[in-house]
């Protein structure tokens, strides 16, 4: 965990109600994709947790849906705005167990952390298969970016307005070695139920702190109560209890 | 050099700033953030006789200038706390430790406090009487002076360490309850616990919290907490740990002026993991501005003309 | 077209948004700001049998996401209100008018309400039982179910217009008090009045308010107010006017979902003189987003699964 | 009263803890010097009342001491910041009764509204005598500005580090026709006690609204309770009760 002041370099809209913001600042606290940051916003008491989409030596990107007042405020902040951010939170995905053909399954606002994950999997020689699920065409984002990494990408939309029609679980491929999933809980559950390999799932909880101090984000697991902000957000499939 | 030290029930604190129960785990988890020995004391997560999972999630909701929690006293039970957590804390921290004890019946409170009392790693016991009273119909022990007196009397018999009673603010007459606790043998009063509150998700048309209601804390409650500290200072002769929204050195001084001998910092430390440290570091320059060399001179000083 | 109308004790309001007592004078002063007829109703400044200067100044202090006031019921007395202020309001406003009546003894409340009851310009009486009870030792009538019942019974006899009782939030069990008011004949409940609070000037080392304590209102109290509306909705079968921190259309809807039939807007309207209007204008688009055509369908809707 | 969005054109420091900010925006609500504005600031619930120092068709200036968190925040806002402001509040000074040689007495943060007043008095043919009181040299401001209007200006400092040594009441001139005073209440009281003409005094109160809705700013006068925000901030000497 690091607490620092980060500067908004730019924010651009990727899709309906979906924005990408690049923050400049220290990224030394990150050690794994799937970790998250927690952003303080003027006028809101609680910080807003967002998965890091990607990071490098100079900064990081987050991608977020504007679902409420906080994310809307964030999307409207001008470049140059300074933000108080906690970085390097949570455990993140482990790339050790992926095998050569890992399956990455993202739903909506769960897509962003898979990008940083895909990069790192490729870095260690894997060739990820990526499935991105959205409700409808105008919400689709980052298909090209994953393709540019040379991933094998399939997009599914619930209403069929783009890519394959259906849920991510309707388009699961064969022959993958492991899975990583991030998205709404019903999607995670469906993936868990259908998965024929081991894997990791990234969860969300309302958070009071983001660094293990409040016990607000507790989750039952096979190994007892765990904190999504500290022991998670990524849980091994084997640990998950529905 | 200014003197930040204060004395709580005979225990000397090098400064009056303490992370509040339930907002700093068992302390040792945060030893990598900064040297815990900078703190005035450490107050442990609320501990009960038996392990508790707590409430279902969502347990957290946002509020204007504050937050609502319905954690529900998640903790591994007093035995695990005393055998694992306190020793782990003692490895990295040498200052005063406050155990925060919850319970659902007089016997449970007494049994749990007795264990904490015997643990050498613990210096002060803070009795949280805001938990629902299972034998008394679900209202908390802190909701009436009579119930408060009963539980404090029983606990007093079971423990010799300084005993602070932590009061619920959700009452008509906080002073009356504080007086009952003093009469029953409390060495000090901690206040306030959280204000009962809730939020509704207008899209889903249902409460945000799985538990429906939760406790409001953070800056929003500061003026209410300050008023209660003021009233209790007038009502009793034992020291007060003041809390509720304290977020900066100015707030800490305001609490002291109202009558608190020390302050606990909860929500502010959840937002900013370094809040306690920043408050401690902010005190000397503020004292200089206010022309004070001994911080403890400020305790209750605003009462002088009232 | 969406339907914003609600019904309060048999009186139809075109929309549920009402400036709160004490934060909108006697209404007519603001007729130049916008057409008062846009409001759901107007609630008058707290009125007592005799004229009152109120407390000394400072009467106002700042709070995180809120404000503290200790105005102390400054008003020209019920006769002047009925003879001058209500007619002045009636010249510019045709909708429902709520008289807010304060008092310090049962007789005073009854006498004042009787006068208001006879005034044709007034549609609803809101009995503010948060004033200190001079005969009962200084606690307010709203501090106990018994006192509340006594005063409501007496007032009920003196008035035939819809009678709302405005409760103090500074109590252990708001539901019990609301039930007592219902049993005593109230037609509705208004809540919440302000939370008792204070601030201290750390430079002067004395309370900011001349009156030492005052009442906290504004966004900070919203989650507490919402919880109390929720509890009272479960406890009684009469309509509720919900207030405490309502600042935008979303807040109004949250209050309705908790059980309020109408909302009053206090502090928000002091910060923004057009707050009520903006809330009213914000409701139709919000209802569209939420898929609601009849606003009154939302009243208490969050209770459905509880 | 007008509610509008005003843009900070610039802020400059005039003296120790004393800043001048020019706000661009509609000024049609002003009808007299000595009226005030009420500024909403992010992070603070209550607005901050400040007397208008001067105004023209395009905007207005305020001068303020940074006494607490609100005024400090205001002084630090960058040019271009948009502020939600109520303008044209209060009654202001009446220039009708001034005579030809009115005396203007300002103490510290009470000096600013006298500038707009001096201009308007001069506009109607009067020649104001101005006394400005400060604690010490480094707090002095606007002496030159008043002089540039061709007023007869005397500065007094309590510690004698600039101008005459003493209080404003130690340097009262003879032969003035009327007085206008704005400053801390003890100064107003001293001026009131010493004045040998009629005059007007501008008061301060903690305000809940600034436009007559809350009765937070009540003041006893010979004509009953008055609201400083609406019936004031300027009271006729004859109305004042100490
Ligand atoms: C570990 C983690 C990683 C996340 N990563 C992303 C991401 O990369 N992109 C993205 O779009 N969203 C992500 N989210 C969800 C994101 O945090 C919420 O959408 C956001 O907090 C909503 O804030 P708001 O003010 O717009 O909404 P509001 O509903 O107004 O927020 C009210 C409160 O609820 C909390 N809240 C609301 N929704 C959620 C949620 N789904 N999860 C946790 N808290 C919530 C808010 O933080 C705030 O405290 C993540 C959540 C977690 C826990
Ligand atoms: C009609 C009027 C005109 C004013 N004109 C000027 C001016 O031109 N220049 C100037 O420097 N100051 C002026 N003041 C005083 C100015 O309003 C305060 O200095 C300012 O509000 C302090 O805010 P703060 O957040 O820095 O201080 P804090 O002390 O942190 O403020 C806390 C609360 O107290 C209120 N408050 C504090 N001091 C005063 C005060 N003296 N009067 C009223 N409320 C106060 C604040 O508004 C706020 O609500 C005027 C006050 C009034 C009532
Ligand atoms: C997440 C959370 C958990 C808490 N858990 C406890 C607890 O276990 N025992 C207790 O006595 N108080 C508990 N509290 C109350 C705090 O100790 C404190 O009394 C309250 O939050 C007010 O202080 P604050 O406004 O600084 O947060 C908890 C508060 C929060 C926010
Ligand atoms: C300045 C002020 C004056 C008030 N005067 C009265 C009053 O005369 N009678 C009354 O019943 N409530 C009075 N109240 C309480 C409000 O009507 C309302 O119950 C409370 O402020 C909570 O609503 P809010 O948070 O929207 O302000 C007053 C509140 C304020 C801020
Ligand atoms: S969010 Fe506080 S412990 Fe996880
Ligand atoms: S400040 Fe509200 S009436 Fe004057």
Image (spheres, coloured by chain):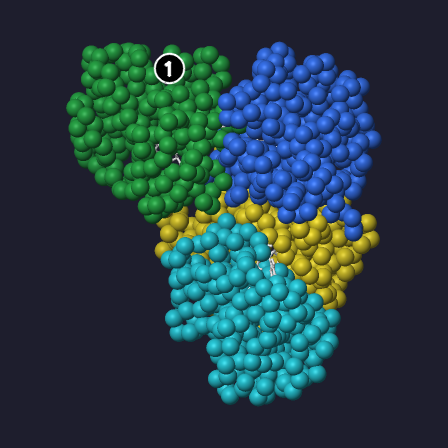
Chain colours: A cyan, B yellow, C blue, D green
Total number of numbered labels? Answer: 1
Q: Is residue C277 above or below residue B44?
A: above
Q: Position of residue B22 (x, y in %)?
A: 62, 60
Quadrant placement of the C terminus of chain A:
bottom right
User: Which chain hosts label 1?
Assistant: D
For this orientation, the residue located farthest to the front is A161
Q: Nearer the viewer, residue C304 or D218?
A: C304
- Residue D86 lies, in percent from the top left, at 43, 32
In this view, B107 is above or below C138: below
Name above or below for residue B175 compared with residue B85: above
Depth order, front residue of C176/B92: C176
Residue A145, position as x, y percentages in the image: 49, 73
Residue wearing tag 1:
D236
Judge whether residue C174 can be spotted in this image: no
Q: Position of residue B1 (x, y in %)?
A: 36, 55
Residue D220 is at least partly visible in this image: yes
Q: Quadrant of residue B106?
A: bottom right
What residue is shown at x 23% (from left), y 34% (from top)?
A: D141
Residue at screen point 72% across, 36% down: C261
* Callout 1 secondary element: strand
Figure quadrant of residue D112: top left
Q: Is mark 1 within 8 Å of ligand 2?
A: no
- Depicted C41 relative to depicted A45: above or below: above
Using a 10 Å C-alpha cutoff, classify the residue at mark 1 as few (fewer than 14 neighbours), some (14 to 19) or many (20 or more): some
Residue at figure coordinates x 62%, y 39% from the top left: C283
Q: Where ligand 3 lies, by image quadrant?
A: bottom right
Point 49% across, 17% down: residue: D225
Q: Is residue B253 left or right of residue B228?
A: left
Instruction: Return the residue nearer the eye: A212 or C265.
Output: C265
């Amino acid at each position: 965990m690091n607490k620092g002041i980060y500067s908004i370099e730019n924010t651009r809209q990727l899709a309906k109600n979906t924005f990408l913001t690049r923050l400049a600042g220290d990224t030394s606290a990150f050690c794994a994709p799937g970790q998250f940051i927690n952003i303080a916003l003027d006028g809101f008491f609680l910080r807003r947790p967002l998965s890091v989409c990607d990071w490098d030596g100079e900064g990081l990107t987050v991608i977020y849906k504007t679902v409420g007042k906080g994310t809307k405020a964030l999307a409207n902040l001008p470049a140059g705005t300074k933000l108080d951010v906690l970085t390097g939170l949570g455990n993140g995905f482990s790339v050790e167990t992926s095998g050569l053909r890992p399956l990455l399954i993202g739903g909506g606002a769960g897509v962003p952390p898979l990008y940083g994950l895909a990069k790192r999997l490729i870095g260690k020689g894997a060739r990820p298969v990526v499935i991105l699920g959205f409700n409808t065409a105008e919400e689709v984002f980052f298909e090209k970016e994953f393709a540019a990494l040379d991933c094998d990408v399939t997009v599914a939309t619930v209403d069929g307005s783009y890519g394959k029609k259906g849920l991510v679980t309707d388009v699961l491929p064969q022959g993958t070695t492991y899975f990583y999933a991030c998205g709404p809980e019903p999607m995670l559950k469906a993936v868990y139920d259908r998965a024929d390999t081991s894997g990791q799932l990234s969860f969300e909880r309302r958070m009071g702190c983001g660094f293990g101090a409040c016990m607000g984000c507790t989750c039952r697991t096979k190994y007892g109560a765990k904190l999504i902000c500290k022991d998670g957000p990524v849980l091994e499939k084997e640990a998950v209890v529905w | 050099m200014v003197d930040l030290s204060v004395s709580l029930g005979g225990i000397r604190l090098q400064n009056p700033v303490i992370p509040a129960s339930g907002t700093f785990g068992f302390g040792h988890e945060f030893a990598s953030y900064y040297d815990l020995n900078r703190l005035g004391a450490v107050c442990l997560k609320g501990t009960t006789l038996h392990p508790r999972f707590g409430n279902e999630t969502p347990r957290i909701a946002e509020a204007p200038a504050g937050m609502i929690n319905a954690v529900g006293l998640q903790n591994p039970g007093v035995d695990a706390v005393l055998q694992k957590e306190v020793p782990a804390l003692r490895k990295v921290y040498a200052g005063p430790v406050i155990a925060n004890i919850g319970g659902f019946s007089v016997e449970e409170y007494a049994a749990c406090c007795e264990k904490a009392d015997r643990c050498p790693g613990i210096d002060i016991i803070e009795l949280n009487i805001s938990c629902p009273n299972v034998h008394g119909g679900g209202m908390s022990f802190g909701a009436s002076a009579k119930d408060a007196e009963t539980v404090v009397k029983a606990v007093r018999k079971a423990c010799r360490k300084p005993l602070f009673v932590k009061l619920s603010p959700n009452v008509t007459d906080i002073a009356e309850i504080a007086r009952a606790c003093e009469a029953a043998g409390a060495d000090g009063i901690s206040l306030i616990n959280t204000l009962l509150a809730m939020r509704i998700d207008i899209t889903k048309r249902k409460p945000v919290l799985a538990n429906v209601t939760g406790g409001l804390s953070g800056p929003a409650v500061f003026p209410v907490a300050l008023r209660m500290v003021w009233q209790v200072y007038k009502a009793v002769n034992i020291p007060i740990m003041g809390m509720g929204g304290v977020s900066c050195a100015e707030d800490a001084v305001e609490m002291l002026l109202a009558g608190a001998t020390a302050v606990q910092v909860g929500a502010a430390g959840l937002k900013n993991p370094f809040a306690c440290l920043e408050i401690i570091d902010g005190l000397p320059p503020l004292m200089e501005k206010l022309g004070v060399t001994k911080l403890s001179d400020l305790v209750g000083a605003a009462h002088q003309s009232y």
